[in-house]
Amino acid sequence: MSSLDNIKRVTVLGQGVMGPDIALSFALSGYEVTAVDILEEPLERAAKKTSLNCQQMVEGGILTEQEAVSAQNRITRTLEWKESVSSADFIMEAVPEDMETKQDVFSRCDALCSKDIIIASNTSSMSITRIASKMKQPERAITAHWTIPAHLSPMVETVCGEKTSAETKGLAFELLKATGKHPVLCKDTPGFIHNYLQFALINAALALIEQKAASPEDIDSVVRNGFGLRLASVGPIQFLDMCGLDTVHNVLKYLHEITRNPGYKPPEVIREKVNKGELGVKTGKGFYSYEMPGSNEFWAQTNKGIIRTLKSFRET
Ligand SMILES: NC(=O)c1ccc[n+]([C@@H]2O[C@H](COP(=O)([O-])OP(=O)(O)OC[C@H]3O[C@@H](n4cnc5c(N)ncnc54)[C@H](O)[C@@H]3O)[C@@H](O)[C@H]2O)c1
């Protein structure tokens, strides 16, 4: 297996919605990037998008003019598929979310790259075991699922298939960290963590629209100004600890009783914790442990993050 020091050139396959921002992320971290598509038009759009992204980052104060120019100079855009794949030290696939297309891309890369090169998929939902099933060396296949906008979002979900090697996982993690990302190892389950959660919310929002219970504008406003504001600082599980698991249990119980919606049935894990007195921040243990039960320290830390987000709301 290759090492991080040997990775100088990253090839990003597909320059639609995601590819250009992934390419820019690698370029911003000093990697030479070959951005490949099978059509001319996405490559032209990608160049404009990347230039605009850089301009916005400079205006936002997170990039200097010089860094923006250097990053853009590190990206080469091309239709030369074979040459770009065979000369890559790491392949990042961002082609359409279609199993056959991805299987075809992975097996062609497998045939062209030397055996120590990792081939990563940006699939949002599909099993990497299936994507890699036509490869001779499936141990070098892995999912690295970036979220939109990829050049700004730190999180990348990393998923190993049945045959992915520990070396592949280790090196993919190292590379993502070197690119300033926060890789999270997920199981090969449909939708992984991000889309499993995100689409639960999206489906619930769409149900409100279908029931004429809320307008699209009101739903977006409630999420952005309500729990959306908090989510960048406190995830949903830590939120339960903040809220108090006894309170959460009572809310769910009430909603379940009046709606009979099985989605509200208090999960066993909540009942168990409430029975053990593990109520979250207020008792010092919930899903996480807290050194000073009920102390103001915890609130001070989380509020700091929320204030940062609130300030950015006011600036825009
Ligand atoms: N759009 C999103 O919000 C989003 C977010 C996260 C992950 N993803 C995932 O990223 C991947 C790409 O999604 P997208 O939205 O950028 O798709 P897209 O359809 O916008 O772009 C795909 C690009 O790949 C090109 N392409 C097709 N076959 C190719 C090949 N063999 N080699 C090189 N290029 C090829 C197409 O011409 C197109 O420009 C999908 O797996 C998707 O699920 C998308």
Image (tube, rainbow, N blue to C red):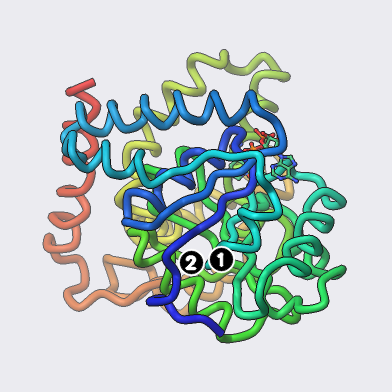
On-image quarter of the C terminus: top left
Q: What element carries label 1?
A: strand
- How far apart marks 2 and 1 lie (CA) works out to 6 Å
Q: Residues within 10 Å of mark 2 (few under 14, many from 20)?
A: some
Q: Is mark 2 on a helix, strand or loop?
A: strand
- What percent of the width, then of the height, locates residue 264? 64, 49
Q: In this view, does 201 lie above or below 283?
A: above
Q: Is residue 221 above or below residue 165?
A: above
Displayed quadrant of residue 44: top right
Asked whether, in this view, residue 276 is left or right of residue 138, the answer is left
Q: Residue 158 carries which label?
A: 1
Q: Residue 238 carries which label?
A: none
The residue singled out by tag 2 in the image is: 184
Name the residue at 68% across, 70% down: 141
Between 78 and 149, the one lying in front of the other is 78
Name the residue at 67% across, 26% down: 206
